[in-house]
Amino acid sequence: MAIFDRLQNLSIGQYIPADSIIHRLDPRVKITAFFLLTIAVTLTPSLLGLLAASLITVLLLRLSRIPLKNALSKLAVPLPMIILLALLQFLIAPRVPEGKVFFSYQILTISAARAYAAGMLCLRFITLVWLFTIAGASTSSIELIYGFDLIFKPLQKLGIHTYTLTMTIQMMLRFIPYLIFNAEKIAKAQAARGARWDDPRGGLVQRAKQILPLILPLINTGLQQADTLAQAMLARGYGTASRRTGLREYHLHQRDVIFLFFTLVAAIVIIWLPQLQALFQVSTAFPAFWYFPV
Amino acid sequence: MADNIRLENVTFAFHPDARDPVLTDINLNIEQGESVALIGTNGSGKTTIVRLLNALLLPTRGKVIAAGLDTADPRNHPLIRQRVGLVFQRPQDQIVASTVEEEIAFGPSNLGLPPREIRARVEQVLTLTRLQALRDRHPFLLSAGEAQRLALAGVLAMRPRCVIFDESTAMLDPLNSKTVMQQAEKLHQQGITTIMITHRMQEAAQCSRVLVLHHGRLLGDGAPSAVFSRASELESIGLAQPIVHAAARELRKFFPSLPANINRTDQLLSALPTHPGNTLVPQSSSPQVACENLTKPLIHVDRLTHTYPAQSAAYPPALDQISLRVMKGHMHALIGASGSGKSTLLQHLNALIRPQSGQVTVGPFNLNRQDLDTIALRRMVALAFQQPEDQIFAYYVGDEIAYGPRNLGFDGKLADIVARAMQEVGLDFDRYKDRLTSELSGGERRKVALASVLAMRADIILLDEPLAGLDPKSRRQLLGLLRDLQQKGKTLLISTHQYEGLLDMLNTVSVLQHGRDVLHGPPQHVFSQFSALHSAGILPPFHVRLAQALRDRGWPIPSAVMGLPALAAAIERGSGAAI
């Protein structure tokens, strides 16, 4: 298969239209909520906190009515990378308190602490991937833009043209499909004049050699298109009024406030679960090393 | 004088001390509600005038009043941008948002209008441009005609007093172009000023006033019948008379009763007189279908079907059981509305797309085979893409043209091959080889693209819409080049919306509709099938319609497809017979 066939198979967006509670949320609430959860999952030092986070993520996945098949397929691309990282963590990462050591040879050490760290890493990344999947699948690019616009709006009081920030995001989203199709056109134009695009032989070096002549023309045409687009935007009055409005209006509903509240609580619990346990003197059946900080 | 457009002694240069400015001493007044066409060859300064009217550029000297406001004052810019709307040539270049309705809302949002007002305008404009059903579609997934309607919709939502179409029809098929012209006409009737920039003289003739620009100076300004009567002058500056004017002038020799100001095809056809005498028995007006050539065709496509990946569900099956036979040394045209599968078919012929089902053979190559030597095939079959922008990727003209021969490996010095190809398209080797491709004008870019294909010395040349967007002069040059190539024995396969100029060169034609070949054969046969052409969204060529109209009025016109001289001769014979 020639490379331009593969380019055609890239999807334009992650959005999956559905009628779910998550889809209906106010975009600024959604962005804030997923941002909070991402922070919590990244920072939590405890396995228990991470397990709570995965549980919440699975719950959100059900609520958003994203097909399980779709969520699993989203893991396929990053999974080898996650496993590789976990393996490195498991085998060679330097670690001070080793705990129980099962096996050791030069820098290669297998210990309970390492197994635990590798497991944490896998769980953390998988949870993150799913959080992004839910956020991406339930928010159209339009909602994303409006969401950021609303979040940045308070900055206008400081005299910052916040719509330029939003427009930057919008332009980024706009250019992705165009870049793909430009790449396809350039690849075809080169192949038509004898470039060996569709040669099935050739290894990684050959592949890299193929991609290289694509990059510069791609940037070149991209810049030219950006220039024309800037003219077209100015011609339609972009930047003339001090305040930009939009087609849609968003109002916070009760469900938005409740959702944000629960997310905030969840984020606190995920990060500080062990401390909270200690605070309330709750004992668990888990052995002590489960809270081993990473 | 409320909303008029006025240019007073306007000179414009990109560098203040440039020797030859883009525009020199332009004086112009356009009253509110006029319908104006602006014509001129590539590089004559048309686009610069448009940018001045929208305050995207400011004059180096002189004064520009747009919508009654001086563009020199930045405080006027918001109102100018709202009142003077601009529709660009390539709709995909001006799309900002990721759904149709957000795209339309972009302008009103920039004006800071309240959301309710924006919503009302979006709904109104969606209805006006018949895009309601597509409101949530990604603009990227629209057809060419829909995308051009969206570009207009985005401008109309600003409630402009003046709409400028900057070569908006250049890339459209005849029916979509007609839609744009009709929409412009409707705006004109509503009292909106319309300015059409176009290379199609026939479109310019439909406006009530024509401005002629040449090397940055205004050479002509008047009613179309006045401007277009100066045939030789127009020719000398690279323009042409609209085909209707040329035909009317010729026919007036026989029919002095033809009115003086004929600007549209339908005006001419309805003014034709009936044959005075007893109607002669028309000689076989239905030409015999050429008997199938028994020699083996050079290009043979048999029941080829192609569907784009499932993810792009917006695409219909691009090719549906299509068949094609092209003989060696023949010129074959693929015609059909945009989206009918012409480009997809062409890309199959040099293995950029491999057959999903059906057979494709080109010369000795079987394109169905997995072990096809694509390099050898592409040495034999060269493809020129639809838009030169899609094809040019090198920084320097010389490198661009040398790319093909360098990859494919040819005998002889590379520089000689490049020089010869450049000479064929009329580019001077020493002057152009070290020019940056990004700094070329539209016409030059097209020549470079063509030279880079010719440099491959292929026997079969596939040309995808080579005539789109060319000014009359470049068009004449390209037609001459195609004639040369044909005489050299090359096999040419051309997909085009503009088949008028090719008629006398073509050996065979295929008409494509929804990925199927609905008609094929010699042009005499294909272009006489009026009803089949109509249902495929194809307008028969002008001379064919003229011949048919004459035949309907009893004139003995022997064959369906003939040029103006042959028609004139037939009319002369007919008049003689009547007396």
Image (cartoon, coloured by chain):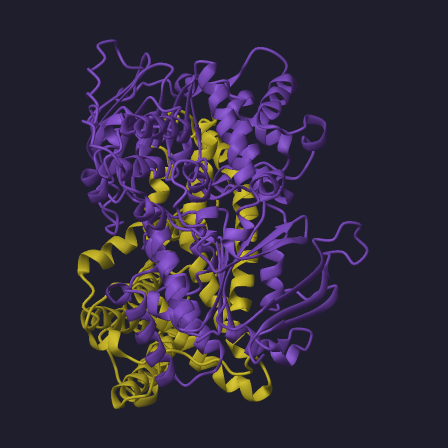
Colour assignment, chain A: yellow
Q: Is residue B422 left or right of residue B257?
A: right
Residue located farthest toward the top when viewing the structure as drawn: B295
Q: Is residue A108 visible?
A: no
Q: Is residue B516 visible?
A: yes
Question: Is A30 above or below relative to B290?
Answer: below
x and y percentages locating residue B254 in the rendered image: 39, 36
* Residue A50 vs residue B71, the one in the foreground: B71
Residue beneath the point at 48% across and 72% down: A166
The image quarter containing residue B533 is top left
Residue beneath the point at 74% across and 53% down: B21
Q: Is residue B339 left or right of residue B409?
A: left
Question: Is B550 above or below relative to B493?
Answer: below
* Residue A173 vs residue B336, the one in the foreground: B336
* Residue B226 vs residue A22, the one in the foreground: B226
Residue beneath the point at 54% across and 52% down: B226
Residue beneath the point at 30% across and 63% down: A133
Image quarter in which the N terminus of chain B is found = bottom right
> Which chain is the one coloured purple?
B
Q: Is residue A220 left or right of residue B128?
A: right
Image quarter in which the C terminus of chain B is found = top left
x and y percentages locating residue A285 in the rendered image: 22, 75
x and y percentages locating residue B467 in the rendered image: 45, 37
The image quarter containing residue B74 is bottom right
* Residue B540 vs residue A64, the one in the foreground: B540
Question: Is A286 above or below relative to B406?
Answer: below
Question: Is B308 above or below relative to B73?
Answer: above
**Number of dots carrying numbers:** 0
x and y percentages locating residue A214 in the rendered image: 50, 39
